[in-house]
Image (cartoon, rainbow, N blue to C red):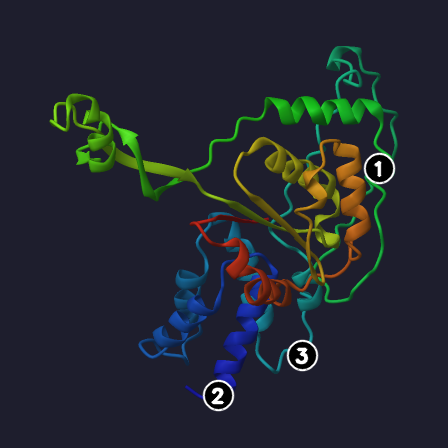
Amino acid sequence: MSGQLLGNLLLFGRVLRGLGLDAGPGRMIDLARALEFVSIGSRAEFHDAARCLLVHRREDLPLFEEAFAVFWRKPAAAESTLDLAALGERRRFRRPRFEPPPLRGNREPPPEEREPPPESSQPPVLQATLTWSAREVLRHKDFSEMTAEETSEVQRMIASLVWNPAQRRARRRKPGTGGIADLRRTLRRNLRYGGEILEWAHREPSSKARPVVVLADISGSMERYTRLLLFFLYGLAQGLDQRVEAFLFGTRLTRVTRELSGRDPREALASVSRSVPDWSGGTRIGESLKAFNFRWSRRVLSGGAIVLLV
């Protein structure tokens, strides 16, 4: 296979990924290998091989057919009614956005009591969601401006959560009914019998709670979830008996374990907002994970820790 054709294949895979299709590097490697067994000069065979390997959902077929027609059109056909740039903007994953439920006391009226929306010929306004960016934006969020109702709702929510993370088997054993004899406790217990062994003491394996480590993204693309995410971290820190380590990252990694240890959720969130400088900015996931591995992993990953990457 010529280098030019391979480069076009990779570029075609990038277009499909922009449309939301599962055309990762592994899929494109499979397609490159499959082209050794089909006639590349036959457009139909090339099309069928690509569709079999790159399309896995029925709703992806129209997008694939349109992208194939635009990308692999003949060079002589300089003009086309299909625009490749506009095609890349039509992503498949356009799911409805769900707003968080209203707080107690601010419930919306039932559907039969709601007023009908005014008729308007204007199209609905869509709220743009920030995507990935490496640009750093330094700002502070004032989470301390929570109303009393929000604070009480958070406290009720945290109190109702039940945490039961996995446990690991500890090296030490505890007194119990296991099959391992505890000679020290046996001798101590039988001193009252003049040293005669009349009662046996046993030991059994013990378990220990695993520590929890959470790394959460607070960049611009996670803007609408940031407050709920902090509530979740605060609930973990207050609801678990074992050690909970919390890290936030956008363009840099910041440890907020100490800030979330306060008993007052309003004070804890205010402390977090002051200690994290890169709210709603860019995202440097690779650099943040590298900083965690080089600086913090040996300190916080001992004891079979459970790691949550949000």
Counting residues from the start of the chain, the first of labels 3 and 2 encountered is 2
Local packing at callout 1 (Cα closer than 10 Å; few below 14, some 14-19, many 20+) is some
Relative to 182, say whether 78 is above or below.
below
Judging by the rendered image, the residue that carries numbered circle 1 is: 144
177 with respect to 218 (left or right): left
Residue type, mark 1 in image: Ser
Residue 30: where, in percent of width, then height?
38, 70
The secondary element bearing badge 2 is classed as helix
The residue that mark 2 highlights is 3
**Quarter residue 168 falls in:** top left
N-terminal of the pair, mark 3 or mark 1, is 3
How many numbered callouts? Answer: 3
Residue sitting nearer the eye, 296 or 204: 204
Looking at the rendered structure, which numbered label has been put on residue 78?
3
Which residue is located at x 85 percent, y 43 percent? 142
User: Can the viewer see residue 104 in this picture?
Assistant: yes
Callout 1 secondary element? loop
Q: Position of residue 126 (x, y in %)?
A: 79, 44
178 w.r.t. 35: above or below: above
Q: Nearer the viewer, mark 3 or mark 2?
A: 2
Q: CA distance from mark 2 to mark 1?
A: 58 Å
Residue sitting nearer the eye, 225 or 188: 188
Disc 2 packing (10 Å; few <14; some 14–19; many ≥20):
few
Is residue 127 visible in this depiction of the protein?
Answer: no
State the residue at coordinates (78%, 26%).
Answer: 150
Q: Is residue 117 above or below residue 281?
A: above
Is 291 left, or right, of 179 in this rendering? right
Instruction: Tell me which amino acid carries mark 2.
Output: Gly
